[in-house]
Image: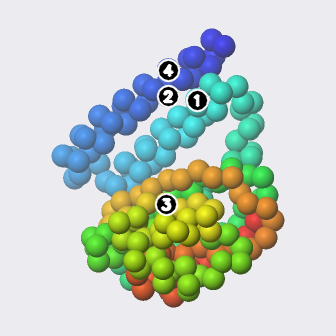
Amino acid sequence: MKFQKVFLFIGLSLSAVLVSFNSSANSEKETYGHHTVNKISQTIERAQTKALNESKGFQSNAGADTVRLEITGDDKMQFNKEEMRVKAGQVVVLTLKHVGKMAESAMGHNWVLLKQGVDMASFANDAIMAKDNGYIPPNRSNEVIAHTKMLGGGESDTIIFKAPPKGTYTFLCSFPGHYSTMNGKFIVE
Ligand SMILES: [Cu+2]
C-alpha cells in the first residue's frame, strides 16, 4: 500500500511539473523544441500510467496487456496509417494527432472505429449532419466502438478502449468528405 501511495504521489507531482512545463514551453518555444517537449511529455505520461496502474494494484507487468497506438492526420486529408493491429483482449491506448496547421472547421480530423457490418459510406453520409456532435451521428452511436474528439491542426486526443473480438474493423475520419481518403483497417488478432 505504501508503494502505491508513493507512485500516485509521483504521478500527481509529475502532472504538476507537466502543467508548469507546458506553460513555460509556450513562451519559450525557441528554447524547447517540439521534439524535446514531446519526449518529456511521453516520459511523464508513461510514469503516470505506471503510477496509476500500480495504485490500482496491477502488477508492473500488467503493461503487457496494454497497447499504445498513434496515428496522425494532416492538412492533405491523410492518415499516416492504413492498418493498425492489436491483440484480442488488449486495452488500446490510442492517440490521434493532427499534425497539420488548418483549423478544425476546414480540416477537422477524428478517428472513429466502426463495429463490424456497418457501412462506412452510409455512416459518413449521416455524419455530415452531425456537426454539433463532433460529426458522430447521435442515432448511430451504437455502431461505433470508440472515437476521438474532432481535432484541428496541432491538437491531439487520446482514448482508451478494450479491443473488440478478433476480426477486421474499419476506422475512418467522419469529417464531411474525408472518409474516402481517411480510412483504414483495424485488425484484432
Ligand atoms: Cu478528417
Instruction: Compare residues 37 and 92 and report the one nearer the observer.
Output: 92
The kind of residue tagged 1 is Ala
Q: Quick check: 4 above or below 141?
A: above
State which tag comes first along the sequence, 3 or 2: 2
Under circle 3, the secondary element is loop
Residue 119, located in which quarter of the rendered image? bottom right
At 33% across and 62% down in the image, what residue appears? 154
At 43% across and 44% down in the image, what residue appears? 41
Q: Quick check: 19 above or below 183?
A: above
Find disc 1 in the rendering and name its residue. 51
The N terminus is located in which quarter?
A: top right
Left or right, 160 with respect to 65, comes to left
Left or right, 178 with respect to 146, comes to left
Q: Residues within 10 Å of mark 4 (few under 14, many from 20)?
A: some
Percent position of residue 135, x then y: 42, 71
Under circle 2, the secondary element is helix
State which tag comes first along the sequence, 4 or 1: 4
Label 3 or label 1, whichever lies nearer to me, is: 3
Res. 9 mark: 4
The kind of residue tagged 3 is Thr
State which tag comes first along the sequence, 2 or 1: 2
Q: Residues within 10 Å of mark 2 (few under 14, many from 20)?
A: many
Q: Quick check: 83 above or below 49?
A: below
Find disc 2 in the rendering and name its residue. 11
Find disc 3 in the rendering and name its residue. 148
Spatial CA span between label 2 and label 4: 5 Å
- Furthest-top residue in this view: 2
State which tag comes first along the sequence, 3 or 4: 4
